[in-house]
Image (cartoon, helix red, strand yellow):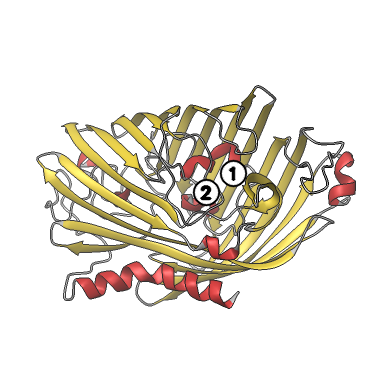
Amino acid sequence: MIRSLFGAALLASTPYAVLAQAMPGMDMPSAAPASPPGTSAPAATRPPASSPATARPTTPMPMDMSMPEDGALSTAGSGTSRLPGNDRMQGLHIAAGDWMLMVHGYAWGSWTDQGGPRGAREAFVQSMAMLEAARSVGDGVDLTLRSMMSLDPLMGERGYPDLFATGETAHGIALVDRQHPHDLFMEMSGRIDTAMGRDSHVFLYAGLPGEPALGPSAFMHRGSARFDPEAPITHHWFDSTHISWGVVTAGYATPHWQFEASAFKGREPDENRYNIETPRLDSWAVRATWNPTPAWSGEVSYGQLHSPEALDPSADEHRLIASLSYSAHGLDATAAYSRKTIVPGSVLPAWLAEATYALTHRHAVFGRVENVRNDELFERDAELGLTPPLLGVPFRVSKFTTGYAYTLPLPHSSAVALGFAASAYAKSDRLDAAYGRAPHSLTLFAKLMLGR
């Protein structure tokens, strides 16, 4: 546990320390200087239009110069996804010659008590460190490079307790009631944006790993999930493809619309969380995103995933996803629906609604409600050769979470959030023997954030 805590904290702080040592004396503003409306920022401080480096800028993107300052209709989420313009990641922005750098990260220590026969009491640490570098490489052409890493593998192959969560494997056995650890390399990607006029551009994105154009922004990048310490139990319905070992996406974007198509590897990451897997482009997805105002963003996407499950390689998945996000007046909220079709197999729908509301600058409350039809809650016992009677039976499960976070600002654009999350569940009576009549969970956390 001590090793995990130290390693995660070190990872979250590493990009800032490395940059400071590598480029002594460089200017380190908290954001790019603003340009008057209707003018272009200098190349050295202008991030690519609608690229990941536009997170929390003070200068509107070139395509949004008609908007008032801080009035961009959208901001970048994970991969090539869009969020409402008001939901902007507050990374640490650094000007270094022709490059605009952005550093963001966290080390999130938690202790959880998941009740019922399948529950567990454990302490664990989640972590993420992200470094982006963006610059102009020609007239109307911008380049963005992104790396994102995590020390989640230090928590072990089985990840952390999360009742009714399913997905991926450990030691050749399906993970049930556990959230799998993310890979050491969460994203290594590059993106080229080319202007097609004052208000539109085309882009090409490639990642190893990366995220295809499928579903909303991954949960750890959504303002609506900023303080919830547990992954959604619907993660493998909405955003599990955010680590795909091989992604190529092409798209067209305007201030209000973005249309994309991706080819990517459908198979989920393997159990070796430290390796670089062989890329493959055997699956595809398309997505349309609409940003009518800086407060709203909606997307509809569809994808066909080839052989995503290692334990059931003959089955494919078709996912139809729709989501809507809102960010204004201290409220960040997301609602989403997914229809996952197993081919051959069942139709498994899910929906999610989550929100974070800032009561004051330091006090926030949050919540999440989920409902999912899941047929993976029981697995065959490989050692004893036993097949449980409920193997493959789909069950409707709902999870209700509420929580509170207190944020204490720290020096150097960092902060720590202290809080808790409590959850209750609704399920079929047929699951009482496995989960108890009224399972519940409580999680306490401290989240150290760099570039909040």
Q: Which mark is residue 255?
A: none
**Looking at the image, how many numbered discs can be counted on the residues?**
2
Q: Nearer the viewer, mark 1 or mark 2?
A: 1
User: Residue 288, relative to residue 356: is it above or below?
Assistant: above
Residue carrying label 2: 219
Q: Secondary structure at mark 2?
A: helix
Res 235 label: 1
Q: Residue at x 38, y 52 (%)?
A: 88
Residue 359 in view of the camera: no
Type of amino acid under label 2: Phe
Would residue 274 be found to the left or right of residue 443 on screen?
left
Q: Position of residue 321 (x, y in %)?
A: 54, 30
In the rendered image, the quadrant that contains the N terminus is bottom right
Whether tag 1 and tag 2 are in contact, CB under 8 A, the answer is yes
Q: Is 301 displayed left or right of 291 in the figure? A: right
Q: Which percent across, then down, holds residue 428? A: 84, 39
Rendered-image quadrant of the C terminus: bottom left
From this view, report whether residue 344 is shown above or below residue 417: above
Tell which of 291 and 279 is nearer to you.
279
> Which residue corresponds to the image point at 87% horizontal and 36% vertical from the top-left?
389
Give the class, few, some or many, for how many residues have Cα within 10 Å of label 2's Cα (few <14, many ≥20): many
Q: Nearer the viewer, residue 415 or 103?
A: 103
Query: In the rendered structure, which disc, 1 or 2, sits on the residue that comes first in sequence?
Result: 2
Image position, residue 382 (x, y; %): 76, 45
Residue at the extreme top: 344
Q: Residue at x 11, y 52 (%)?
A: 42
